């Protein structure tokens, strides 16, 4: 609880300054050119007091954000959310049913572990970009790019307040 109450938006700005957010956006755009999936990245400094009192987990919050950001709302059920709860350095990946059915939890857990390792070393931008590329390589294998496929979700990272 103390970690959440002491981690604010300044921590997000320190971990992800504007150039890092632009690099993440570019990585999403570039990897989406190689597959038919839609990737979103969202970072949140900490959970609010109400969520902490409810014992909300990062996983539960990620699912909530998956809905709020409408990652589920793609024509081919091919959305993937990478959610980072900075206070806990906890990464959650939520994939829509079309993707999750082919890849499953073990793939997402491995990507999350690699990203969390980078974050423990203070490599936030690199950790996210490597995670995006890892997800992209899985999507490229199972959901190859389709000609003239629309970009259904914004590529810009979301910094949750």
Image: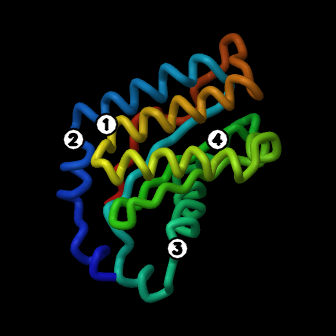
Disc 4 crowd, CA 10 A, few/some/many (<14, 14-19, 20+): many
Q: Position of residue 71 (x, y in %)?
A: 60, 46
User: Mark 4 and 2 residues: CB-CB less than 8 Å, in contact?
Assistant: no
Residue furthest to the top in view is: 147
Q: Under tag 1, what secondary structure?
A: helix
Which of the 4 quarters of the picture holds residue 89? Answer: bottom left
Q: Position of residue 17 (x, y in %)?
A: 21, 41
Q: CA distance from mark 3 to mark 1?
A: 25 Å
Q: Under tag 3, what secondary structure?
A: loop
User: Mark 1 and 2 residues: CB-CB less than 8 Å, in contact?
Assistant: yes
Give the residue pinned by disc 3: 57
Identify the residue at image location x=46%, y=46%.
115
Quadrant of the image for the C terminus? bottom left
Q: CA distance from mark 3 to mark 2?
A: 26 Å
Give the residue pinned by disc 1: 21
- Please report whichever mark, 4 or 2, sits nearer to the chain's N-terminal start: 2
Count of labels shown? 4
- Please report whichever mark, 3 or 1, sits nearer to the chain's N-terminal start: 1
Label of residue 127 in the image:
none
Q: Under tag 4, what secondary structure?
A: strand
Give the residue pinned by disc 2: 17
Identify the residue at image location x=44%, y=26%.
27
145 lies above or below 80: above
46 lies above or below 53: above
Q: Under tag 2, what secondary structure?
A: loop
Identify the residue at image location x=54%, y=50%.
112
């Amino acid at each position: 609880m103390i970690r959440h109450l002491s981690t604010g938006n300044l921590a997000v700005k320190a971990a992800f300054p504007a150039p890092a957010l632009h690099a993440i956006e570019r990585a999403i755009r570039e990897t989406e050119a190689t597959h038919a999936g839609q990737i979103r990245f969202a970072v949140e400094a900490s959970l609010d007091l109400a969520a902490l009192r409810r014992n909300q987990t990062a996983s539960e919050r990620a699912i909530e954000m998956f809905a709020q950001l409408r990652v589920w709302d793609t024509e081919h059920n091919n959305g993937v959310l990478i959610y980072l709860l900075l206070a806990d350095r906890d990464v959650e990946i939520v994939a829509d049913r079309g993707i999750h059915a082919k890849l499953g939890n073990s793939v997402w857990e491995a990507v999350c572990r690699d990203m969390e390792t980078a974050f423990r070393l203070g490599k936030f931008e690199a950790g996210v970009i490597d995670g995006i590329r890892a997800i992209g390589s899985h999507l490229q294998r199972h959901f190859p790019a389709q000609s003239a496929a629309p970009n259904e979700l914004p590529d810009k990272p979301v910094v949750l307040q």
